[in-house]
Image (cartoon, grey):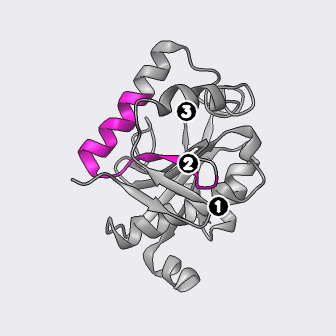
């Protein structure tokens, strides 16, 4: 399989390189970024996360790819696709996800990368529907889901204390192929 690379106006979504990981963790393993993602990761959690991301690529041909800014090559975080694997969640469904460093927030990068990922899900990877998930209190994340045209799927919500012990409900949004094509034709 050829190396994955997909370009948008301002971003490159691509396969991970070994030298990306220290930059990624330095920029995203912060209290603000990890607030709704279970908190700061220690070395063991970082290694496990990296191995999971790489295994998704091997097993399914897609993952949460490295998100690089085209203008200067900065690693902004990740965005992409995986198969949902959260305990209690909608297992096996195609899932879009993103995590960007704090200084990249509010600039449209997450929406640009998520739009590209959804285009890829439907055009390249043959998805019929794509979900995205977050904790209820992460209003920025589910706000983006709404701006992407995803709709709330309360019947898929589930409890998982891993990310927000005070309010352990993971909420799910989705968009199907037909709706996505109608919006983004």
Residue, far left: 1
Residue 146 colored in magenta in the image: no
Q: Which mark is residue 111?
A: 1
Give the structural element (helix, strand or loop) at label 2. Answer: strand
Give the structural element (helix, strand or loop) at label 3. Answer: loop
- Alpha carbon separation for disc pair 1 and 3: 26 Å
Location of mark 2 (residue): 68
Marks 1 and 3 in Cβ contact (< 8 Å): no
Give the label, 2 or 3, closer to the camera.
Answer: 2
- Alpha carbon separation for disc pair 1 and 2: 14 Å
Foreground residue among 175 and 109:
109
Marks 2 and 3 in Cβ contact (< 8 Å): no
Residue, far front: 72
Residue 116: percent from left, percent from top: 51, 65
Instruction: Give the residues drawn in magenta, as a range.
Output: 50-71
Foreground residue among 165 and 20:
20
In which quarter of the view is residue 153 placed?
A: bottom right
Foreground residue among 104 and 167:
104
Location of mark 3 (residue): 160
Say if residue 53 shows up in the picture: yes
Q: Is residue 6 above or below residue 37?
A: below
């Amino acid at each position: 399989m050829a190396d994955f690379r997909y370009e948008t106006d301002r971003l490159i979504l691509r396969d991970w390189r070994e030298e990306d990981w220290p930059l990624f963790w330095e920029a995203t393993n912060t209290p603000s970024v990890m607030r709704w993602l279970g908190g700061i990761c220690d070395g063991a959690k970082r290694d496990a996360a990296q191995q999971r991301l790489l295994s998704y690529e091997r097993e399914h041909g897609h993952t949460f790819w490295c998100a690089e800014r085209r203008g200067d090559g900065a690693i902004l975080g990740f965005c992409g696709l995986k198969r949902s694997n959260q305990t209690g969640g909608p297992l096996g469904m195609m899932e879009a996800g993103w995590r960007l460093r704090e200084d990249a927030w509010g600039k449209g990068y997450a929406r640009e990368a998520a739009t590209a990922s959804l285009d890829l899900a439907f055009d390249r990877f043959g998805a019929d529907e794509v979900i995205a998930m977050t904790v209820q209190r992460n209003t920025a994340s589910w706000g983006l889901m709404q701006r992407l045209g995803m709709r709330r799927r309360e019947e898929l919500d589930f409890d998982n204390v891993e990310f927000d012990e005070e309010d352990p409900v993971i909420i799910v949004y989705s968009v199907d192929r037909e709706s996505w094509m109608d919006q983004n034709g």
